[in-house]
Amino acid sequence: MKLENLEARFQEKIDQDIKIEPKDWMPEKYRKTHIRQISQHAHSEIVGMLPEGNWISRAPSLRRKVALLAKVQDEAGHGLYLYSACETLGITRDELTDQLRTGKAKYSSIFNYPTLTWADIGAIGWLVDGAAIINQVPLQNTSYGPYARAMVRVCKEESFHQRQGFEIMTTLARGTEAQKEMAQDALNRWWWPSLMMFGPADKDSTHTAQSMKWKLKRKTNDELRQQFVDQTVPQAELIGLTIPDTDLVWNVVNNEYDFGEINWEEFWQVVKGHGPCNKERIAARVKAHTEGAWVREGAMAYAEKKKSSSRKIAS
Ligand code: 3HC
């Protein structure tokens, strides 16, 4: 069958919401852009463990420590689901993690900011995981089967992450003056980077148009960002914190919040590797890979031994 007929039939499947599975024919560009997005998503989950892991040993109570441990462990699992989904597109785990360590692959800009106080852990759960839920819920209906299915469990676990973060912020905001100031300071530092998580404005987005056509994306960057602002501003007001945006105002005509201009210069600087913690994050991943070599070698040796002994039994 001619390429154009194959592509037409492929788009018909997408338009009829028929899931694309690993063994189905797909345009090379569809495969490539899924490897791009799913791998960056997986890298984001793994790198995202670093800023939060920084506070596990300093959590203010056993209850907070247990919740944070569970969350960080969940993020590792999300990364593994997503690497597995990505591997179904014909790329190996070693290639994927090598791309992260060598800086060839991106991960979410948000994880290049430092976690300076305990309130940052609350702000990350509330804002970053809150943004992630808004971005990830539509991905449960993305056209690529393995990605959509991976998202179902990820989204369930993200809800717990967001809730434990908002509880931390609520406790601090209703605590002593110093605690409330710590919560407000964290909101001031994490608000705008959280809006940047949704990517550039639609007019500046390289991939959105094609990703919408292929139902990789079900909503655009700006639509999801707007949904996040509209959902989060009332939450801040509920606990007496102020969103650090003097242009924020309810638009009665459009029934949504108008908000200030995002600092896109900062966004692209961070995406290009010049954020506050980019180098530290990659160094941590390189160190973990080097120090974990013995685990990989041991597992491979064991797998090899198992394989050769089952070959002996079979012969
Ligand atoms: N950080 C880093 N790079 C970003 C970015 C961000 N926040 N937003 C956009 N970019 C990059 C894109 O990767 C693309 O670069 P590339 O061509 O080299 O890949 C370029 O900027 C242009 O942006 P586009 O909007 O055209 O790119 P996308 O269509 O891929 O949209 C996205 C970006 C909205 C992040 C999309 O990739 C997406 O929805 N990804 C899946 C969800 C995801 O990865 N979320 C990241 C956070 S995961 C998380 O928060 C875990 C939670 O447990 C805490």
Image: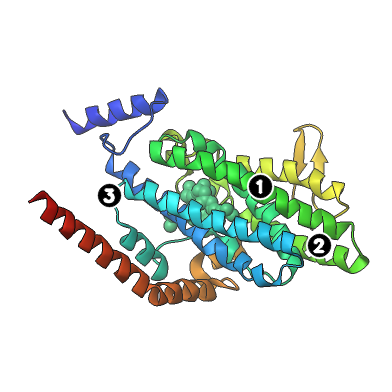
Picture quadrant of residue 154: top right
Q: Are marks 2 and 1 in contact (CB under 8 Å)?
A: no
C-alpha separation, residue under disc 3 versus residue under disc 2: 44 Å
> Looking at the image, is 144 positioned above or below residue 261?
above
SS class, disc 1 = helix
Q: Is residue 152 visible?
A: yes
The tag earlier along the polypeptide, 2 or 1, is 1
At 84% from the left edge and 56% from the top edge, which residue is drawn?
A: 171
Q: Using the image, tell me which numbered label, if any, was put on residue 183.
A: 2
Picture quadrant of residue 184: bottom right
> Looking at the image, is 250 positioned above or below residue 131?
above
Mark 1 — residue?
A: 160
Residue type at numbered disc 2:
Ala
SS class, disc 3 = loop
SS class, disc 2 = helix
Residue type at numbered disc 3:
Gly
Whole-percent x, y for residue 69 in the image: 62, 61
At 35% from the left edge and 26% from the top edge, which residue is drawn?
A: 13
Mark 1 packing: few (<14 Cα in 10 Å), some, or many (20+)? some
The tag earlier along the polypeptide, 1 or 3, is 3
Q: Is residue 130 visible?
A: no
Residue type at numbered disc 1:
Phe
Whole-percent x, y for residue 10 in the image: 31, 29
Answer left or right for 162 relative to 294: right
